[in-house]
Image (cartoon, rainbow, N blue to C red):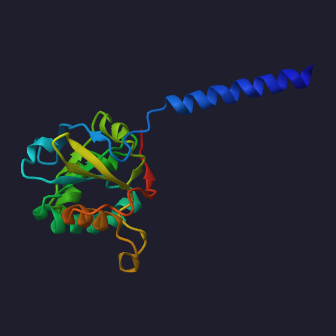
């Protein structure tokens, strides 16, 4: 009898767990249409994807000041913007962390970091932490490559920037670059999803 009750309890827990997983919003998948947003930039202005009338798409990157992984990728994120903004795919960086938990990611710190590094891309704050859950971002950095179409901004790639966060000179697969290059050539992206490596977003 005790065994039966124990098994029944286990089945109930597993059922509830399964339900929770099914009902959880995991954000965008490849092929989804990403909704626009309006977030404050480090210059105090509000920025939306719709502001970029001539863009062909966007390299939306969730990143921050305090994560060592994000810091390791700062120069590579800047390089992506310098290479692709003029070709129609600008970087749009978004800081998703709760600044009460990570004060080093507050707006003043973002402004200082951007000035120190010479960022040429907008560095936006997801102040109310509403945008990163829509995307399904879990790490910093976490990249979403969007392609502008008549239907909207279609998600074409999700994941890491490349395959070596430790050493930029030892990278074998440049996932984001390969994906953008494919879109610019009108070709299919070979690798559309990878696992983002970084710090968890602080809620």
Residue 181: % across, % down: 24, 67
Quadrant assignment for the N terminus? top right
In-front residue for pair 106/12: 12
Q: Is residue 71 above or below residue 147?
A: below
User: In the drawing, does residue 34 fall left or right of residue 119?
Assistant: right
Question: Is residue 50 shown to the viewer in this render?
Answer: yes
Name the residue furthest right.
Answer: 1
Q: Position of residue 128 (x, y in %)?
A: 29, 33
Q: Name the residue at the bottom extreme.
A: 169
Residue 171: name its quadrant: bottom left
From what the image shows, is residue 8 above or below residue 90? above
Q: Which residue is at the front of the view, 130 or 111? A: 130
Q: Quadrant of residue 103?
A: top left
- Residue sitting at 56 percent across and 29 percent down? 20
Q: How many marks on residues?
A: 0
Residue appearing at x 34%, y 63% in the figure? 71
Image quadrant where one finds the C terminus = top left
Left or right, 91 with reference to 65: left
Regarding residue 118, the answer to whether it shows in the image is no
Q: Position of residue 156 (x, y in %)?
A: 31, 52
């Amino acid at each position: 009898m005790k065994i039966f009750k124990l098994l029944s309890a286990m089945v109930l827990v597993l059922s509830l767990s399964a339900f929770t997983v099914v009902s959880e919003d995991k954000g965008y998948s490849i092929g989804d249409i990403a909704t626009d947003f309006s977030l404050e930039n480090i210059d105090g202005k509000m920025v939306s994807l719709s502001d970029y009338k001539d863009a062909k798409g966007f390299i939306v990157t969730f990143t921050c000041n305090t994560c060592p992984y994000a810091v390791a990728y700062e120069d590579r994120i800047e390089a992506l913007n310098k290479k692709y903004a003029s070709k129609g795919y600008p970087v749009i960086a978004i800081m998703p962390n709760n600044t009460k938990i990570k004060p080093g990611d507050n707006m003043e710190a973002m402004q200082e970091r951007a000035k120190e590094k010479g960022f040429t891309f907008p560095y936006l704050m997801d102040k109310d932490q509403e945008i990163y859950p829509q995307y399904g971002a879990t790490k910093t950095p976490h990249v979403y490559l969007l392609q502008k179409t008549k239907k909207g901004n279609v998600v074409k790639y999700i994941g890491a920037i490349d395959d070596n966060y430790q050493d930029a000179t030892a990278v074998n697969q440049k996932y984001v670059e390969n994906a953008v290059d494919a879109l610019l050539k009108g070709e299919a992206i070979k690798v559309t999803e990878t696992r983002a490596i970084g710090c968890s977003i602080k809620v």
